[in-house]
Amino acid sequence: MQSAGKLMKVFITRRIPQEGLKILSAAGVCEVSQWDSDEPVPRADLLKGIQGAHGLLCLLSDKIDAEVLEAAGPNLKVISTLSVGFDHLAIDEIKKRGIRVGYTPDVLTDATAELTVALLLATARRLPEGVEEVKNGGWSSWKPLWLCGYGLSGSTVGVIGLGRIGMAIAQRLMPFGVKRLLYSGRTAKPHAAEVNGEFVPLDTLVSESDFIVVSCSLTPETQGMCDKSFFSKMKPTAVFINTSRGAVVNQEHLYEALSSGQIAAAGLDVTTPEPLPTNHQLLTLKNCVVLPHIGSATYSTRGVMSALAVQNLLGGLQGTDMPSELTL
Ligand code: NDP
Ligand code: DGY
């Protein structure tokens, strides 16, 4: 048993699944302080809690920038984020200070791909509208022209970012009878052959797809990529789905495209900001389905993410391998 003075200090920015906390406590090498709430840690408490910490376990809602790193001071060896996305981390600042970063790829791929397919089908087949009509008495009889949507069979699907999640989405969509699978990104992917994926320029993907699924990471290049010009190239019958990050989309331009009928519908699991204000204009549209960023939200996935995030944290604290270290 180490004396309390020798324990390394860890700050955890949220209540997280027990799976990770059990591993942390069994390791017995840390003095843990935690923002033990389901709501985000206020910035002032983050800046206070991280002082002198050797390790930080954070979430995608915590902006880890130079100010936080300065507040932490020179002890900080590792930042472990409970997410695969790392756009909330100021990577240049972190790298400059020699801090290691852990993240949670792969373990959430299936859950996120599944949710993306659910969102695509719900949006294309207008499920939330249908449920609402059943409840509000709008269902008067079976009507040939009522609540029609778009099907996947014989369609062209375009995946922007055929990475881990993009590929898992494509694998799940192909059995619905998709005719062509287009994808775009920085580089062609050998694994695309498995889904007969065609690597095409973004403009081709946008103009030829019946369904567009955004599953890339948020980077300076992808920020605001889905804008007026993007939506103007889409077919008027096409459905737009985003489960990557809200900032990939210009939401004002999306609103214009949806409300003017330039595109058929959109399904978003991610928005800017999060939460989306309840009076946001996108929420007034019947052809826009918005979910509260629940891509990876299955009990088992969140448990495994928690365990992995803690294992990454411990690796960073002890100077050993991390199961999932981000290459900086
Ligand atoms: P990967 O790194 O495996 O995939 C990211 C993909 O983004 C790569 O294929 C990459 O293509 C592509 N990409 C990068 N830059 C561009 C660009 N300029 N244009 C088009 N594509 C680009 O990550 P994951 O698949 O594991 O995760 C992807 C993202 O999904 C995460 O970063 C996160 O933001 C989001 N996510 C959302 C969840 C949710 O709850 N909604 C859950 C989990 C993740 P290339 O290799 O050619 O550069
Ligand atoms: C991530 O991991 O990046 C997601 O957005 C949440 O699981």
Image (spheres, rainbow, N blue to C red):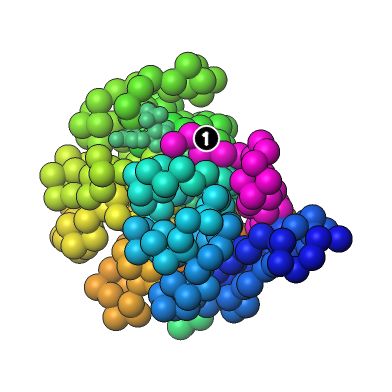
Q: Which residues are magenta?
A: 302-328
Position of residue 23 measured from the top left corner of the image (x, y, whole percent) = 78, 56
Residue at image location 41% in from the left, 59% down from the top: 69
- The residue labelled by disc 1 is 164
Residue at image location 41% in from the left, 42% down from the top: 95
- Under circle 1, the secondary element is helix
Q: Which residue type does callout 1 highlight?
A: Arg
Q: Residues within 10 Å of mark 1 (few under 14, many from 20)?
A: some
Quarter of the figure with the N terminus: bottom right
Position of residue 219 measured from the top left corner of the image (x, y, whole percent) = 31, 43
Position of residue 197 measured from the top left corner of the image (x, y, whole percent) = 43, 22
- The reply to whether the residue tagged 1 has its Cβ within 8 angstroms of ligand 1 is yes
Quarter of the figure with the C terminus: top left
Q: Nearer the viewer, residue 300 or 101?
A: 101
Any part of residue 128 in sight: no
> Within the magenta stretch, is there residue 312?
yes
Q: Quadrant of residue 235?
A: top left
Position of residue 106 measured from the top left corner of the image (x, y, whole percent) = 60, 39
Any part of residue 272 in sight: yes
The furthest residue to the right:
1
